[in-house]
Amino acid sequence: MLTEGDLRKGPNLATPLLSTTTGSWRLVRPVLNPKRCNNCLTCWLFCPEGCFTRGESIVSLNLDFCKGCGICVAECPREALILVEEGSNDARVSER
């Protein structure tokens, strides 16, 4: 049985500590354009995995648990996120 000590306070919910990451099987990943992000935290609010944390000027993204669902990309009002194929070095982020 889990105790309070077994939980970490994630950005959205208290989640059990995992010894392995779950983002290793995704096919696409979100990429953040820092010039477009205004730290509104809409991505944080809608991310089902809690992969976003608030930074000083922009959010930071933890890809260890990101499954590539694209909800953050669809909900971002400033279009600061795009999905790219896993393993690619997509330059479109700087062109937008």
Image: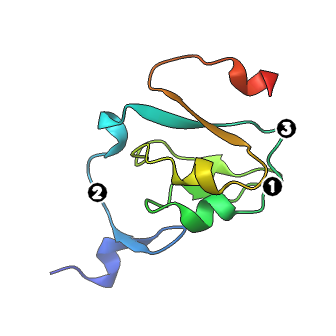
Alpha-carbon span between mark 3 and mark 2: 33 Å
Query: Residue 93, located in which quarter of the rendered image?
Result: top right
Q: Position of residue 24 (x, y in %)?
A: 32, 35
Q: Position of residue 20 (x, y in %)?
A: 27, 47
Identity, as a three-letter code, of the amino acid under mark 3: Lys
Q: Earlier in the sequence, mark 1 or mark 2?
A: 2
Q: Position of residue 50 (x, y in %)?
A: 49, 61
Identity, as a three-letter code, of the amino acid under mark 1: Glu
Identify the residue at horizontal 44%, vertical 25% (top origin). Answer: 86
User: Which tag is nearer the camera, tag 3 or tag 2?
Assistant: 3
Determine whether 20 is above or below 28 in the image. Answer: below
Question: If the image is split into quadrants, where does the N terminus sit?
Answer: bottom left
- Specify few, some or many for label 1: CA neighbours under 10 Å numbering under 14, 14-19, or 20 or more: few
Q: Residue at label 1?
A: 56
Label 3: element kind:
loop
- Specify few, some or many for label 2: CA neighbours under 10 Å numbering under 14, 14-19, or 20 or more: few
Q: Find out whether the residues at labels 3 and 2 contact each other: C-beta distance under 8 Å.
A: no
Asked whether 69 or 31 is in front, the reply is 69
Identify the residue at horizontal 82%, vertical 42% (top origin). Answer: 36
Identify the residue at horizontal 58%, vertical 16% (top origin). Answer: 89
Q: Position of residue 26 (x, y in %)?
A: 35, 36
Asked whether 73 or 23 is in front, the reply is 73
- Specify few, some or many for label 3: CA neighbours under 10 Å numbering under 14, 14-19, or 20 or more: few
Alpha-carbon span between mark 1 and mark 2: 27 Å
Q: Residue at label 3?
A: 35
81 to the left or right of 16 = right
Identity, as a three-letter code, of the amino acid under mark 2: Leu
Determine whether 89 is above or below 17 in the image. Answer: above
Question: If the image is split into quadrants, where does the C terminus sit?
Answer: top right
23 to the left or right of 52 = left
For this orientation, the residue located farthest to the front is 74
Q: Residue at label 2?
A: 18
